[in-house]
Image (cartoon, grey):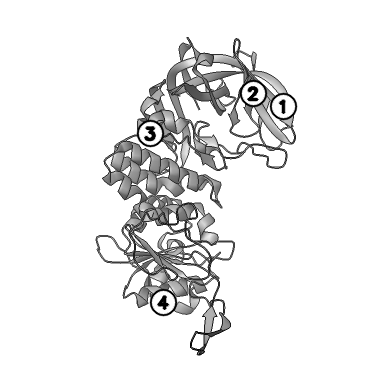
Amino acid sequence: MRLIDTQGKTFQYAALSHCWGSAPQFTTTKSNWTKLAANISFDALPPLFQDAVIITRQLGLRFLWLDSLCIIQDSLRDWETESSKMGSIYQNSYVTISATNSGDGSGRCLAERRKPVKIPFENTLKKEFALRARRILDHHPKDNPDGGPARPIGPLSHRAWALQEVVLSTRVLHYTATELLFECKTSYRCECAPDRRACPTTPSLIPKAVASKDTNAVWDVWQRIVEKYSARDLTVGSDKLPAISGIASKIRKATHSDYMAGLWRGNLASDLLWSASSPVSTTAARFALETWRAPSFSWASLDTAVTHTQLDDEERDTFKATITLLTVAIKPKGMNPLGTLSDASITIRGPVTTASLCAELNRGEWTYVLIIKGTSTIRIAPDCLLVNTNVKHEDGGERKSVRRAQSDDPVEAFHAPVWCLTVARYDSLVTGLVLGVSERSPEAWERLGTFAAGTEAMQNLEEQDLTLV
C-alpha cells in the first residue's frame, strides 16, 4: 500500500466516510508524505482503516480515498484545495464505505455482532426447531414506512461533515451496529429487508429534484438538507460552511444562482426566513458565537438547528417577496469560494417599520414580543438569547438597540427599539426579520429573529435601503 498521485488518472475507487473522534489520528503531513508514497504498513493503520482496506479489496477495487491520508493535514493550502473538492470526491467514488457505528479510528466496521438468543420452537407437526433471533436497530422511516431514505443509527449520523458525503455519493454501504445497509440513487436494501424496492434515498435527493426541472424543488431540497445539517455536530466551528460546500456546488450548478453564505440569490426571501428550531430558556441557553463566522442573516452564524417555513401548494402560489436585493459583498477567506468567509454583507430595499422589543422571562422561557403602534403585540422567534445595548457611532454618540447575547452577558428583561423588515407575503400573512443596529458596523443592521403577523399590522410601510451584516 502507498499514496499515489491521481493527477490525470481515471479509475474506480472507494471512499471512507468516518468520524475522526478524539483518538490519535494516522495522517499525512509535510514531513512524512514522501515515506507514505513509498509504502504504508497495514499494521500501522488504525483498526477502522484496516477494515476499509479489507472491504475495498473484497469488492475488487484497488484504490481507496481516506481524508486523513489523502490531504496533507498540516498544509493549509492543501487542505483548502482538497477540501473544496470533497463533494466531487464522494460523488465520483464507485462506493462510499460509511463507518456509521464507529466513533473514531479505533472502532471497526467489521465488528463482532451481538450473539443471537436461542428460542425452542415446535411446529404443528410436533417437529422441534431452534430459532435464533438478534435485536436490530430500527432504521426504517417511522413517518413513512413504505418509502423514504433509510436512517442508519450511529455516531457518524451526528457528524456535519458526513452528511454531504452520503448526499453526494452514488452508492453507500452503511456499517451499523447490527446490520449492513446499501443505499444508491434508486433504492436502499438492508439485511432485514433485502428485496430491492424503488424508494427515496439520501443520494437521490438532489438528482431527483434536478430531474424534475422545477427550481422550487431544488430550493426545497437545499432547505431540507440545511435543516438536517444544522442539527449535526462540528469539531471545528469554522468548518460550518466548508463542510456543506460540496452540496452548495451541486446546487449552484443546477440553478446557476449566486451563493451568499448559505443562502441563494434566486430564493433569497424564503432563505432569509429560517428560524431556530427550539425556544430559548434558562435551561437551554443559546448564544451568539464568540468568533465571527458568517453574517447574521445566515443560519451559519449560529450553532443551532434551524427550520424553514414549509409552504403548501396554495401558500406557495401566493408567496411574494417584498424585498429587492441591491448589492452583495461576499469575501471568501481561503481558496474555496463556497467555504470560509472573511466578511459578508447584503443591501436590501424593502418595507420597514420601527418597533419596541420587550423581553420577559415566563416559567423559565424567554419570550420576545414586538410592540408596534396601532397593532397588538407580535411574538417573535429569536435567533438566540438577546440583550439590549448602546451602540457607539463614529461621531461619539450612542444609539440604543438590541443584539444577540454572548455567553458572558447578563440576560435580563428589557424594552428597546428595533426595526422590522417585511420580507414576504403569503395568504393573509406578512413575515420578516427583526433587526438591531450592528456593533461591528454601526451603519448596518444585524438579524435578531423573525416575525409573522397579519397583513393589517404591516400596511403602508415606507421602503428603505438596509445593509445586513
Q: Residue furthest front?
A: 124
* Amino acid bearing label 1: Glu
* Amino acid bearing label 4: Ile
Tag 1–tag 3 contact (CB < 8 Å): no
Q: Residues within 10 Å of mark 2 (few under 14, many from 20)?
A: many
Lower sequence index among marks 1 and 2: 1
| Residue 34 placement: quadrant | bottom left
Which SS class for mark 1? strand
Residue 313's disc number = 3
Q: Is residue 73 visible?
A: yes
Q: Mark 4 sits on what residue?
A: 54
Which SS class for mark 3? helix
Residue 53 at x, y percent in the picture: 41, 74
The CA span between labels 1 and 3 is: 37 Å
Residue 56's disc number = none
Q: Residue furthest bottom?
A: 127
Above or below, 265 against 302 in this view is above
* Amino acid bearing label 3: Asp
Lower sequence index among marks 1 and 3: 3
